Amino acid sequence: MASRSWADWAGWSSGSNETSEIRKPGITKIIMMNAFSVLSPTCHRAEYLIDQECCPKCPPGSRVKTDCTEFRSTSCLSCIDGSFIDEPTGRKQCFLCTNCDSGSGLRIKTSCTTLSNTVCEPLDGFYCTDSDKDNNCIAAQKHTSCEPGQYIRHKGTAFTDTVCTDCSSDTFSDGTSTSCRSHTKCESLNLQLIKAGTASTDAQCGEHSSNTTVIVGAVSGTLAVALVIAFGISLAFWCKKKKILKTQSVVLMKTANMSYEKSWRRKPLNTVTFLIIMMNVFSVLSITCHRAEYLIGQECCPMCPPGNRVKTDCTEFRSTSCLPCIDGSFMDEPTGHKQCFPCINCDSGSGLRIKTSCTTLSNTVCEPLDGFYCTDSDKDNKHNCIAAQKHTSCEPGQYIRLKGTAFTDTVCTHCSSDTFSDGTSTSCQSHTKCDSPNLQLIKAGTASTDAECGEKSSNTAVIFGSVIGAVGLVTLVIALGIFRFWYKNKKSSQNSEERRNDEDAAKREPLRLQGLSSV
């Protein structure tokens, strides 16, 4: 069989005009049908692609039983107990419900249905340490217990742990209180220190040893003297009575008189001694000052009022002299101090600013700058911040689980799989799913970046190739038609000219022959 030229396939070869008229629209139709057949698998959002067919998705709470065909729609089945589907789907299996494991510190907040997953929350005394993309807690841990010598600075919540801080000097806590208490100052209660306070226990006070010793000594001494005197008198009386029986009555009488006189001479002396001792005891016991007084030497002086300090102590003849505190100092309670306390400086370099300015009656109250949180506060005023720190910045791949406040730091949590965050958002976003019929994955998503999608290379190549091929084929066919038309016209012109030349030659030939014959 002879080979066929491209012109023969195109239907433009000579002698086949009728065939060309039939084939030209047939080729165009085939090309266009192929192009539209490639473009057709682009499904609606409520459809899913299966074997080049767009099938309707099953509604939430259902799964696909059988896919659709050319003659029937998708067949769906409801999810069974313990499973769910929360969006229209083309899946043939429902998702299993999450189990809130009490052994992991979790309990059910919202039960699972066929339309939604279980929502878990931490048990009482626990806090969430990990959550999914929908902020559903998936892991929890028990709150930290503060140790003796620490106080609960921030109580634990469902999403934050307990924050413990060590007590400062001269304060104590057993670990269960929200602030440290100052050690009892025994001297202010006119008591003496029995046992010094620690970070976990208060100081122990007792009666002054001097008072106790004097009282006990005085009483014991008095009783001892009385007993000695009584014993001496009894002994002397017994001895003298015995002597009367052995000696002469005159001698006995003299001895008795002498003993009697001696015994009565001692009585006034013993009474004076007792009175002196008792006066000393009462003089010691009398030095107990009122709460609004302070002890200086052996004198109780009136305290100066808040906002003042002592200039001169009181004497027997005048009261306490007071002076107001100068600017930059304060005294917030009645006092016997001769100097006011200096006001606190809210240092911006330490992340602090003034909340309430200092007066002569109260100290400065500081608060954290914007973007900072308090790390230590005044033992006497927990709202007065004395140290602050900048909020933690979440890194790419983490999301802001809890925004920082003036008293708590920012809480960052890593994104779960198939989600991402640049570190500035309050939740992780799901990676774009490039499962649409006309998209393909160009670059996989990471914990900090989204997935990159692009047109599917197969569809693009086919469409582009089909269009280019169709345009090229049409152009070639048109070019061949033009060439054929030009070629036929040229050939006809050549034939006509040759015929005219032949006719002219034929006409000139008899004349030439006549000329030759005449010669």
Image: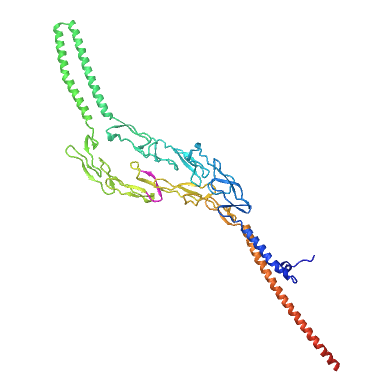
**Relative to 299, 22 lies left or right:** right
Q: Quadrant of the N terminus?
A: bottom right
The magenta region covers: 368-377
Q: Is residue 519 visible?
A: no
Find residue 221 and report its image quarter: top left
Main secondary structure type of the part rendered in magenta: strand
| Rendered position, 88 above or below 283 | below
Q: Is residue 57 magenta?
A: no
| Rendered position, 300 above or below 450 | above
- At horizontal 77% and vertical 84% (from top left) the residue drawn is 501
Q: Is residue 376 visible?
A: yes
Residue 449, percent from left and from top: 53, 53
**Relative to 130, 492 lies left or right:** right
Residue that lies at the very extreme toward the bottom in this rendered image: 519
Residue that lies at the very extreme toward the front in this rendered image: 71
Residue 428, percent from left and from top: 50, 49
Q: Quadrant of the C terminus?
A: bottom right
Of residues 237 and 306, the one drawn nearer to the viewer in this rendering: 306
Q: How many marks?
A: 0
**Relative to 311, 468 lies left or right:** right
Task: Please say which color scheme the image uses.
Answer: rainbow
Residue 20, percent from left and from top: 71, 69
Q: Is residue 369 magenta?
A: yes
Residue 261, percent from left and from top: 14, 15
Of residues 152 and 209, the one drawn nearer to the viewer in this rendering: 152
- At horizontal 75% and vertical 80% (from top left) the residue drawn is 494
Find residue 247 and report its image quarter: top left
